[in-house]
Image: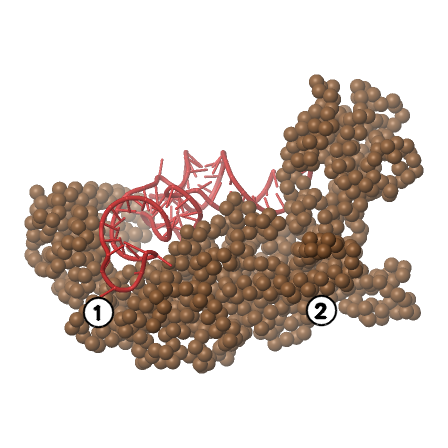
Chain colours: A brown, B red
Amino acid sequence: MMDKTFEPATVEARVSAAWEKADAFKAGRGAVPGAEPYCIVIPPPNVTGSLHMGHALNNTLQDALCRFERMRGKDVLWQPGTDHAGIATQMVVERKLSAERNISRRDMTREDFLNEVWAWKAESGGTIVNQLKRLGASCDWSRERFTMDEGLSQAVLKVFVALHKQGLIYRAKRLVNWDPKFQTAISDLEVVQVEKSGSFKWERGGEEAFDSAKLEKVLNRDPGGHLYYFNYPLEGVAYDADDASTFITVATTRPETMLGDTGVAVHPENEKLGHLIGRNVVLPLVGRIIPIFGDDYADPEKGTGAVKITPAHDFNDFEVGKRHKLDVVNILDGEARILLADNADFLAGSAPESETLALHGLDRFAARKRVVALMAERGFLSKIEPHGHTVPHGDRSDVVIEPWLTDQWYVDVRPLAQRSLKAVRDGRTKFTPESWTKVYYDWLENIEPWCVSRQLWWGHQIPVWYGPDGEVFVAESEVEAQALALGHYGGTVELTRDEDVLDTWFSSALWPFSTLGWPEDTAELKRYYPTATLVTAFDIIFFWVARMMMMGLNFMDEVPFKDVYIHAIVRDEKGAKMSKSKGNVIDPLTIVDQYGADALRFTLAAMAAQGRDIKLSTARVEGYRNFATKIWNAARFAELNGCARAEGFDPVKVKQPLNRWILSEAARAAEEIAAGIPSFKFNEAAAAAYRFTWGQFCDWYLELAKPVLQGEGVDPAEKAETQATVAHVIDLICQLLHPFMPFLTEELWAQKAGEGAPRKLASGDDALVCLTHWPDLAALRNAAAEAEIGFVVDLISDIRSVRSEVNVPAGTQAPLVLVKASAATRATIESWRPMIERLARVSEIALAETAPAQSAQIIVRGEVAALPLAGIIDLDVERVRLSKEMAKLDQDIAVVDKKLGNPDFMARAPEEVVEENRDRKTAAEARKLKIAEALTRLA
RNA sequence: GGGCGGUUAGCUCAGUUGGUAGAGCGUCUCCUUUACACGGAGAGGGUCGCGGGUUCGAGCCCUGCACCGCCCACCA
C-alpha cells in the first residue's frame, strides 16, 4: 500500500540512498555499445560555499539535460567538482582565524596558513556537494575533482609554462587594480564601478567661509562624489588667490593624489591656458617644482582645461607621464595609506613643512579630508562641487580600488581571443540565447592583457623561480628550474620561487579538459572532449566561458563545448544580485525542506525561460508541490482500483478509444518534452508535462475511466485493459517527468517494480532504481480516438458550463436530449452514456428530432444538445445567455466578412488562411442558426 | 558615451517561420461526490508602454519616444 501522502523528505532520502548504492550516474553506465557520448562539466562551485538559488537553477537545468540524454541512450558524463576560489576562500579563513583566535595570516607562516585553509576545506568542502545531491544532481560523483587536486594543479603548471614558451605570458611593471583590503592585484573583471554623487558645495569668495568639519561630515558618509578645484601657483611669481595670472587651476575627484603630482597638462591649442605651457608650478604642500606641458589628453572643455597628472595613481596619467617622461611618485602603501617616505621632495626637505602636515600614515580617505583642509587653510582651495562619477571597487572586498605600480604576470590573450572569436563565428560553439554571442564578441574584440598573479597564499603558486641576479626561470618544478639555472649560470645557485599565486579563473579556464585527465592522454579525454553543453549564467561569460574557449582551443586544439546555454540570474526581491557579502542569499535548501526538491526543480525549470532575472516566488513552488501531490494521489487511485502493470501489456494493441486517447496524448506530450529539453526550452517541456499529467490524465482520463473501473457489469476485458493502461500511463508519466522530478518519479517507478514484468535497465542491469529509458510513443498517436474523446470532453464541458450559467443547482440531475444526432454521434453517445451521465450530472440521455420546449441549448462540434429544464431554470437567463452568444457570433462573422470581402486579403493571404476563415464563417453561421431556433422556441 | 534586455490579466511571468492572446498564484460562485480541499466544477479579468510605419493582417517586423533594469567604457 502506498502512503496516504507524499512526503518528499522521506522519499528523497530513500531514493538518494538507492542511487548512491547503485552508483547510478557513473559515466557510461547502462550505455549500449556505440552510444553517443554526452558530457557536461559542472560550473564548479566554491568549495567552501553553500548552495544558493543560482546553483539550484543552474544544476536543475544541467540535471534535466543529463537525465534526459541518459534516458535517450547516450553515454552521459556529468563531471562534478569544486573550485578553490582563491580570494573568497582565503577571505573566509582569514575572517575565521581573526574571529576565533584573533590572529591574522601575517602573524603566521605561509605553510601554517595553508594548513588552516586545507583543514577548513576538509571540514566544510563537502557541504556544497551534499547540497547538490539533495537537489538530485546526477553527477558521476566518483569523478569529483577539485581545482587544487594534484592532477589539476599539474595541468595548471603545464599551461603556465607552455604559455610562457609561446611568449604569451610575461612579467611587467605597470599600474594594476590594487585591492588595499586583500592587498593583491585583481583583474579588470573583478573591478566593479559604483556610482557616487556628493552634496557638498563651496566656492572661494562666496558667502560662507570654508568649514572643513562640515565637509568631513559629508565625506564620512561617503568619501566620493565631489570635484575639488585647486590653485597651483606658478613658479617665480608671488601667489595671490585673487590674481588669476599667478596660478593655474586644476580639478580632481581625488585630492589626496596631488601629493604625487608630477605635472600639469594643458591642451596645446587651449586659447586661455596655452600660454602657460612651458612654465612650472610649485606643487602646494609638497613644494615640488613640476612642469606645465602640452598634451591632447587635456580636453579644454572639461574641468578647468588643465589636468593635474599623477602617473603613479591613475591609468590615464600613467600613459601621459610616459609620453612626457614625468617622474612617477608613489604616495601610497599596500593598504592605501599615505606613504611619504618614498617621496624624494619630502626627504630632501624641499617641503620644509612636511613634519607639520601630518599626512604620513594616514588612510587615503583621512588624507583626502586633511589635504583639502590644508589646501583651504593655505588659500589654494578654489571650489568644491558635487560631481557624479563612478568609483572602482573590488567585487569581493567592496573597497575602493587603487591603481598601483607593481610587478605582475600577464597573459597576452589577444591571439587566444582571435581563435575563440573564430570558433564561434564558424559555428563550432553556439550560444543560446543567441544574443549573448554579441556580448562575447565585443569583449574578445577589445580584450586587454589578463593580470593573472595574485598576492595571496591560497591558490596555485606561480611556477617561476628567480636567480640571485633576478634572472627568471619558468619551469614545472624546482628541479627543472634548477636545471635551467645550471645552464644559465654554469653552476648551482640558490633560486627563490615567486610567492604569488594565480588568479582562480586561470585553473577554471582549464576545467573542461583538466577534469578529464589532461595532460594525461586519458580515455575520458578522448571520449568526452569536446563536451556537449555548458550551462551557466551570463555574469561569468567573460570570467569563465571566454577563457575556457581560449584555453581549450590553445591546448586541445578544439572548442571545449558545442553549446553554451546561458540562463537567468536569480536575484533577490529588489533585483540585486545575490551574494554572500550582501547577505541577501535565499537558501534553496529551506525551500527543499518545505516543499521538496522536485517542486523546487520543477519551478525553476518552468521559470527558466525568463529573461535575465528570476524573482522566485514561493507561491509558484507551492503550486508545483501540489502537482507532485496530485501525481502521488493519481498513483494511489490506480492502486486502489487494481491498476497494476500487466505482464505482456502492449500499448499499441489497446482497443478502447479512451485508452487509445490517453496514450495518444501521452505520445504528444512526450514529443513536446523531447523537443523542448535539448533545445533548452525547459519551460515548454515542463508545461507540456504538467498539462498532460494534470489537465488530461487526472482531470479527464481518470474521471472517464471511473465507470469502467468502478462500475457494475463492465466487460472484464475492457476493465482489465483500462487497469493496465492506467498503470502504464503512470509509468509513462514517471518517465516523462523524470528529468524534472527525479525523486517522485523514481519512487513511484520503484514502488511499481513488483508488478508485471520485472523492471530492467536499458543495459540489462537488474537494478530496480534509476529510470533509464525514454519511451518512443510515436506509434500511439491516434486521430480517431482524439476526435471521439474530444467530442465527449467538449460535450461534458459545455453541459457543465451551461448548467452553471443558467444556475442549475449543482446537485440537480437533468436529462439530456440530442437533436437530430448523426449516426456517429449516436454511437459515441451510446458508448459514453455512463461517463456523460456521471460527469455532467445527466439523469438520462434521449434522442429527438426537435428540441423540447423550455430547454437550454448547447452546440458541440456542430451537434445540438438540449437540457430540458422546465421549472428548474430561469428561462430569461437562458434567453439572455443565448442572445449574448448570438451577438458574439455576429461580431465574429463581421470580422471574418471584412477579411473575406477584402480583395487584397483574398488575393494575398495564403489559401489555407482563407479557407480557415471560410470555415470559421460557416461554423459561426450554422451555430447562429441553431441559436436562433432555440430563441424562437423560448419566445 | 556605446551596447543589451524589459514594459502582455490584480501579482509573477510565458508567447520566433506575423493569421482573432496563455500559465501559475490570487479573485468571485458553487461543490466536502470513498485518489487528491496541496482537491473538483464554473466564472470574471488584457485598447499586449506610447506614437508612426511595413503588411491583406502586427503582442510578434521597422522606426521614434517614455519609463525600468543590466553590461561595457569614460569621468579633470
Residue hosting label 1: A710
Residue A46 versus residue A91: which sits nearer the camera?
A91
Name the subunit of mark 2: A
- Tell me if I can see residue A232 in this picture: yes
Q: Is residue A18 above or below residue A452?
A: below
- Subunit that carries the residue with mark 1: A
- In the figure, residue A775 lies in which quadrant? bottom left
Assign the C terminus of chain A to one quadrant of the image.
top left
> Considering the numbered disc 2 on the image, is that residue within a helix, a strand or a loop?
helix
Q: State the quadrant of the N terminus of chain A.
A: bottom left
Amino acid found under the numbered disc labelled 1 = Gln
Q: Residues within 10 Å of mark 1 (few under 14, many from 20)?
A: few
Q: Secondary structure at mark 1?
A: helix
In depth, the one of A566 and A53 nearer the eye is: A53
Residue A806 lies left or right of residue A49; in this view the side is left
Give the labeled residue for mark 2: A154
